[in-house]
Image (cartoon, coloured by chain):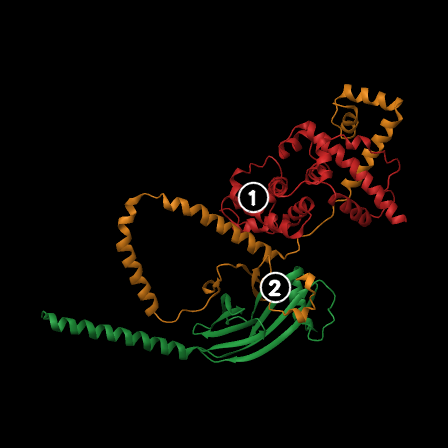
Chain colours: A red, B green, C orange
Amino acid sequence: MAKPLDHKTAKDVELVAASQAGDMVAFEELVARHRDKIYARAFSMMRNEEEAIDLAQEAWVKAWQRLKQFQGDSSFATWMTRIVINLCLDQLRRQKRTRAESIEQLDEELGGVERQMPVVASNPTEGLERAELRKRIDKAMVQLSYEHRTVLILHEFEEMEYKQIAKVMNCSIGTVMSRLFYARRRLASLLQSLKKEQQS
Amino acid sequence: MRLKPKSSRMFLRALLILMVVSAWGWQVATATAAPEAKVQAILVWGTDEIKPDNKSLKQLDGKLHEKLAKVFKWQHYFEVSRKSSDLPAGKSQGLKLSEECSVEIKVLPENVAEVKLIGKGKTLVTRRHSLAKAEALVLAGDDRNNNAWFVVLNFN
Amino acid sequence: MNIELKLQALVDGELDAREVREVEALLARDEFASLLVQELKWTKSAVRHSEAGVALPETREFFWSKVERGIAAEARNQAAPAASVAPAWWTKLLFPASGLAAMVAVLFVMSGPRSSSDDALNENVAEDINAYSFHSEAEKMSVVYVSDENADFSPVGQEVKNETEAEK
């Protein structure tokens, strides 16, 4: 007779298999294990606590419905992260359609601005405590458009390659590269301004 | 023996009356069988701000503060008002907690309390709560500016 | 691909061996390109090390109750259209079935008071209200949380909270 599953000590793969067979307790354990990571990803993309909570919740509901499609090609955490990223992107696209574009965003879309920016020769984040670094990057990230922020998140946090980002964001590899380049250059410039502000 | 049509009608009427009386008798019997209880209702305001300069707010007692802080995300909990009452069996008891908020509680026969949260004169939530276990019932919700309110009901 | 993007691709390890040699040769003779690569490198590293360990600001029970409710709602939504296209043959059984159900209901009512259990607990909420309920075994409390984006109902008076007009 098969041993009953101890949900607390079971591995993710075992919990996924049990959830696929309809075990809600196993699924709850998966939610408990990965809920912070999924929320953190939603928050990094949305920059809004309420929206991030709602989207994280929606991602878990979607995951339950699509569990049968999970083949184990990647880890469960990676699969879940993809779901929440797609939901966030859908939401951000909807929001973009309903609000007027700022002049800065139009500049970004036209491209070329990033080439005019002077190179930030010395690293303005050097010697910063981790908490202070987070604070400053956070402040700078808010000022990027969602497309630029998302490429950075997918590349640096999710460690995706250009072609994977292009697939997720439904654009060309060239667009991914331009967006990433602009996002990094703008971030460098914003971080330098923040350092100057701090010093003055 | 076959009944004549008239006596058949009379028999059906008698049966109907008997059923109505039985149902009424059952209701009365179960209503009187409902246990009595006591309730304490506390209206609490949860916020992340430091204590506002207001004398009508007081710090929530430590134990309840700790309980709420373990379940909810807010850092500060203040007591807005507190009411206690006996709950006569089968009768609805209203407790007014603020200008716009009251609760109505009725102890039902199955050792269950039916709690109605009334806001601006409208019943917002009706919840049945078992009195068998010594557990609190908390009716809560979003307030403006990312704050929250809580109606904590303790029965004994 | 323009040269700036090639420099970035070098930083990200997205170039093949031949392209790497080409770009490195350029770096050796072009100071601006070299400075730009430095900037791209520290920006990449700063972002990579800045991911905050943000935690979901809701308890396990509360969050799970919302997920569980969402799953149940989706299941109902999916079941509804399926029911509407169900074959008509069973509808013939509706009448006798409803009679049977009525009889069962009468028997149930006449059987006297039921014992109370957690399963018997239930709640009703006003139509325009979105509420979640959950139970915390550890803190011994049952919670019904009314989620109200506009916070139209506030039992705590403004005079208590010292709200300014602008905050309302």
Task: Quarter of the image for the N terminus of chain C: give it.
Answer: top right
* Other-residue count near label 2 (Cα within 10 Å), few / some / many at <14 / 14–19 / ≥20: few
**Residue C32 lies in what quarter of the image?**
top right
Three-letter amino acid code at the position of disc 1 = Val
Mark 2 highlights which residue? Answer: C138
Three-letter amino acid code at the position of disc 2 = Ala
Residue C130 location in percent, x, y? 53, 58
Asked whether residue A136 is in view, the answer is yes
Of the numbered discs in the image, which one, if any, rests on residue A16?
1
Give the answer, above or below, for where C144 lies relative to C64: below
Give the answer, above or below, for where A84 lies relative to C13: below
Q: Chain of mark 1?
A: A
Q: Chain of mark 2?
A: C
Question: Element type at marker 1?
Answer: helix
Name the residue: 65% across, 70% down: B64
Task: Quarter of the image for the C terminus of chain C: give it.
Answer: bottom right
The residue nearer to you, when weighing A33 against B40, is B40
Of the numbered discs in the image, which one, if any, rests on residue C17?
none
Residue A181 location in percent, x, y? 76, 32
Residue B67 relative to residue B19: left or right: right
Give the answer, above or below, for where C41 lies relative to C124: above
**Residue B153 lies in what quarter of the image?**
bottom right
